[in-house]
Image: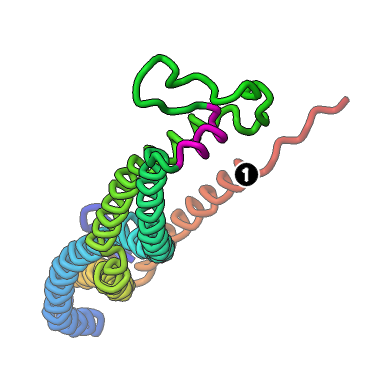
Amino acid sequence: MYSTSPPQQQEKNPGKKCNDADCMTKKTIKTSKNDYCAKLKIKLGALQQCEETYKGKKTEYEHKKCRFVSTEKNYRIFRNVELSVGIQLKQASGNIEKNITSYVTFDTNLSAALTDLLATVKTTKTKFSDLRDAGCKLDACCKDSCNRTQWAIITGEKFEDCGDDKHKPEHPNHEKRPADCENAVSIFHQLIHEPASLSKEIDIILNSAADVIGIQTFSNITSLSQQFLPAVKGNAKIFDDFIVDRMTKGSTDLATAQANLSQTIKDLNDAEFAEFNARIDLDAYNGVKEFLCHHKCECVCEGEGRLDKCKCEICEICHEVTKIYSIETEDKIPATPPAQ
C-alpha cells in the first residue's frame, strides 16, 4: 500500500535515517522493480498486439457489414421479383393454357359447324337450282296455249288473244270455286319467279360460308396450343426457375453473411475487451513499477512502528467502503409507513 502524500522520513528512533540501500527490503524492491520493468515490455507488446487485432477486427467488421448489406439487398431484389413477377407469370401461363384449350375447342367446333353448313348450303343450292328449273318449266306450261283450259279452271281466268275479255271468268260458276284456289295466281307467280331470287341468295350464302371457312382456317387457332403455348410456358418456367434459384442461393448467402457478421461482431467485442484488459494490465504493471521506483511509503524503512501508518490508511479505506455500502443499502430499504 502506498500514499500520495509527500515522502515522510520521520524517524521512530531519533538519530536513525531511512537510507539503508543494502537492507533486505531495498534489495527485494529492486528485484521486483527489475522484474516489473521486464514484464512491462511484454505487456506493452501484448497491448500493441491487441490494438492491431482490434483494428483488424474493426476493418473486418466493416467489410462483413458491407457484404451483408449488399447480400441482403440482392436477396430482396430477387425475392421481390419472384413475388411480383415470377409467381404471377407461372399462374398466368396456367390461365393462358386453360383459355387456349377452350379456344381450340371452340375453334374445332366452329370448323365442324362451318363445314357442315357449307355442305348444307351446297345441297341447298342444288335443290334451289332444281326449283328454278321447275319454275321455268311451270312458266312455260302456264304460257302454253294447250294449258289454257287448266289455267282457267285453276285460276278462274282465261286468256284471249285480244279484247277486254282477257280476265273475265270462263263460265258463270267462277264465284263457286274452292277457297284454296282464290290465291292461285299469286301462288303461281311465286313458284315461277321466287326460285330465281332464291338461287341468287344461295350463291351469296355459299360464297360467304366459303369465305368464313377461309378466315377461320387462316386464323389457325390450333397453332396457339402447338407453338405459342409451349413457348410461353417454357420461357415462364425458365425465368421463374432462374429467379427461384437466385433467391434460394441468395437466402443461403444471406444466412452465411449474417453468421459471418455475427461472428465478426463477437470477435470485435472480444478484441475490444482484450485491448481494454491489456491496457489495464499495462497500467497496473506501470503503476507498480512507478511505486517501486519512486515509493512514498515509510514501511520500507527499518524500525519499530513503520507499519502503523499503513494500517491506519487501510482502516480508513475499509471505513469508507463500509460507509458507501451502508448508504446504498439504506437507499434501497423501503420507507416504514407512518403509524396509524
Q: Position of residue 23 (x, y in %)?
A: 21, 82
Write the residue at 63% across / 43% down: 330
Q: Is residue 252 visible to the viewer in this orientation of the structure?
A: yes
Q: Is residue 75 left or right of residue 120?
A: left
Please tell me which residue lies in front, 181 or 231.
181
Write the residue at 41% across / 14% down: 164
Which quarter of the picture shows residue 22?
Answer: bottom left
Write the residue at 23% across / 84% down: 28
Identify residue for label 1: 332
Write the residue at 26% across / 63% down: 217
Residue farthest toward the right in the current orientation of the protein: 340
Mainly helix, strand or loop, the magenta region? helix
Q: Check disc 1 and give the amino acid type.
A: Lys
Which quarter of the picture shows residue 160?
Answer: top left
Q: Is residue 208 left or right of residue 319?
A: left
Please tell me which residue lies in front, 291 or 150.
150
Whether residue 117 is in magenta: the answer is: no
Q: Which residues are magenta?
A: 147-156
Residue farthest toward the top in the current orientation of the protein: 164
Whether residue 153 is in magenta: the answer is: yes
Q: Position of residue 215 (x, y in %)?
A: 25, 56
Work out which quarter of the rendered image holds the C terminus and state it. top right
Q: Secondary structure at mark 1?
A: helix
Identify the colour scheme used.
rainbow
Q: Is residue 16 visible to the viewer in this orientation of the structure?
A: no
